[in-house]
Amino acid sequence: MAATTHFYETFQPEHYDLYININRANKLISGKSTITGDAQAQEVLVHQNGLTIASVQADGADVPFTVDNDIQGIRIELAKTGQITLAITYSAKLTDTMMGIYPSYYEVDGVKKELIGTQFETTAARQAFPCVDEPEAKATFDLAIKYDEHDGETILSNMPEDHEADGVHYFETTVRMSTYLIAFAFGELQGKQTKTKSGVTIGVFGTKAHKANELDFALDIAKRSIEFYEDFYQTPYPLPHSWQLALPDFSAGAMENWGLVTYREAYLLLDPDNTALATKQLVATVIAHELAHQWFGDLVTMKWWDDLWLNESFANMMEYVATDALEPDWHIWETFQTSEASMALQRDATDGVQSVHVQVEDPAEIDSIFDGAIVYAKGARMLVMARALVGDDALRAGLKQYFIDHKYRNAKGDDLWGALADASGMQVGDIMHSWLEQPGYPVVTAAVVDGQLTLSQQQFFIGEGKEVGRQWQIPLNANYDAAPAIMKDKTVTIGDYAKLRDASGKPFRLNVGNNSHFIVKYDQTLMDDILANVDDLTAIDQLQLLQDLRLLAEGRQISYAAVVPLLSRFAGSHSTVVNAALYQVAGNLRKFVTPDSDEEKHLQALFDQLSADQVKRLGWLPQAGESNDDQLTRPFVLNAALYAKNSAAVLAAHELFEGNRDKLATLPADVRVFILRNEVKNFGSAELFDSLLAASRQTADASYKADICEALTATPDADLIKQLVGKFEDADTIKPQDLRAWFRGVLANPAGEQAAWDWIRDEWSWLEATVGGDMEFTTYITVISRIFHTAERLAEFKAFFEPKINTPGLTREIKMDTKVIASRVALVEDERDAVNAAVAEVVK
């Protein structure tokens, strides 16, 4: 038969009876996948990957089959088309890849333990059982699990357990769902449960390496999130329970398996008595994101992976909508501005970036489209724009109808736009297509030309970019009523500037609130007016001003040297978002200096000027009754003071370390990392290094473990760096899920850059074998691209990665990151002298 891309075209499953036997001792999986469905052809295709197929039967009789590893499938010959039941017996190895069915490792009181879990998104269900492993191939599932069980173990799955017989655990039949959302886990677990107002059972589970109270925060957030979504979506949660499970080894951040959501421990469990507010906010938004998916992604699933944004962009927006409703005092939309918006604008300015809606077929390429800055962050910004256009009432009404029309089935992007159009009377899809189908975004130039206030749009690039005439329908969000709500044309004239300015009484501004995905370049007249009235701007508007100046400087449309004298105007702000934007700009200046040079000393003096008053105001330790802004701002200014080598800050951190030497984990979580890093950098020793590395191995506190990582990777000692790099492949010391953070830390350390770069080139094959099967793999390349900034490193990067450019899943990342480094190298070479002169002038 002719080759086909989608197996669903040949065989459409309706129900699975799955029996899976997992033997941890022998690291073996065996089982039988019995699939009832509709054969569309006499040769049908069923997915497998890495399975040994023992037999295939159709309606009880053996049938011919061949395993085709090139398509990750089984070709099965049938005597007829139509309704049929396939029974496929198979076996496989239980591997440590963090994909499919796999073990997680942890310790309790020095005893090594093992927890089995699953990760099937995007295409790893086929590693666990034969199936049609495509989003559209929804079916119901009866799951039966047997394992080498011992006393004290718990097993969880998407649905409640129905009964256990002869060591086999049988679960209730699932609702109609996609294969990538099936999940189960078993091991020695602890858990806490509660119920929502509507009777849904909520549970949080983790290993017994954690204190019981570390489950409490997540239980509360999960319960209230489900209740919020039932109300907001006006659609009941469709399953009996919602389990949240922390896995000790987990490649992604979290996964929305229907009814059994899995998480990295760092994103679910936390110490209620010593966790930074920023960490609580992160955990809350991750939980809210995954639970948003229980409707948007699970109940209604994208038809194919090209509409991945339907799942992820929407959940990314809803995590903020929900968290804002649950914890309004957090002002969580400010975090959206400093993280999602900033990340999206940076990534989306590189020529060659993917669009939000992207065509994809190859399984390796499917993993590569999970671009956090585009499909998650930019897509969420698009939906924030759409929400602002239609309003919440229409949004909720449209979503309710969307769920009614497509529940337990699949949808495409246009189905969502159709539902929102029906609810709002606005053809919002016409506007959104220009954003979702095109990569990149515009810079809108606002200028006074012959007395007329004029606007023009053009695609914005950081680095070289090919102008191809892209245009967008831009929600301008101007503060002058004379400006159009939507800018559809390349240029628009608004009117006589003097009259408009006089009538308004305030400077002209665009993208007020920073919710539209574009940046603004004001001419000198307009910019001078804004800067003269900068204190009248809201915190978000000040953030936006700094953000746009930074991007314009990165894109060579203005000089970084012109931005340097402006920074002090924002240094006294008590707002977290302003400080986040300020120190992002200041941090970008570090690429223009070499370590320990006179130029770096001037830059350190600038950091000292910017942070000194704030450090004095806030101090090192949290104060009773201080504002959320103060808690979230303190890390920015302490980090700046330590980079500045401010002697008082260095000494204060050292004294806090000495006073808590025997209880470092109890240091306040929002400043602990700075105390540890300061100690390693300025007072370090081999003994300190060894003790912190041992603490990292022993602690179950993911936040403390991350702090130790950041501290140890900052050591200036070449021998200790060598020792640390030698631990990169020791999973008992550095888990593969955490390796990227350790690698990044050493690479970003001038004393460790060469060692880290040598390691990844020497050990690429090992890295590929260890984490190459998951969607995090390409981000190792991204990490390198964010650090390298010299012509020598660019040449080495190209020499190593260009031969790999045709590797499925790596192509776009290598091309993109080559451009990212090249543009930074050109910027540094062209502007280094001017920027350093500007810094020297400011601090003299």
Image (spheres, rainbow, N blue to C red):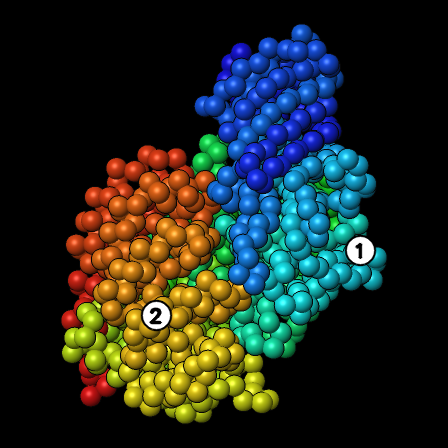
* Residue 239 coordinates in the image, percent (x, y): 77, 48
Question: In the rendered structure, which amino acid carries the disc numbered 2?
Answer: Phe
Q: Which mark is residue 285?
A: none
Q: Is residue 282 above or below residue 351?
A: below
* Residue 274 coordinates in the image, percent (x, y): 57, 76
Residue nearest the observer in this picture, 279 or 9: 279
* Residue 685 coordinates in the image, percent (x, y): 29, 74
Residue nearest the observer in this picture, 497 or 66: 66
Residue lying at 65% horizontally and 34% vertically, measured from the top left: 21
* Residue 321 coordinates in the image, percent (x, y): 64, 63
Query: Would residue 213 be visible to someone looking at this image?
Result: yes
Residue linked to disc 2 = 689
Question: In the rendered structure, which amino acid carries the disc numbered 1?
Answer: Val
Packing grade of label 2 (10 A; few <14, some 14-19, many >=20) is: some
Q: CA distance from mark 2 to mark 1?
A: 48 Å
User: From the image, which quarter does the C terminus lie in?
Assistant: bottom left
Residue lying at 60% horizontally and 37% vertically, measured from the top left: 23
Packing grade of label 1 (10 A; few <14, some 14-19, many >=20) is: some
Residue linked to disc 1 = 200
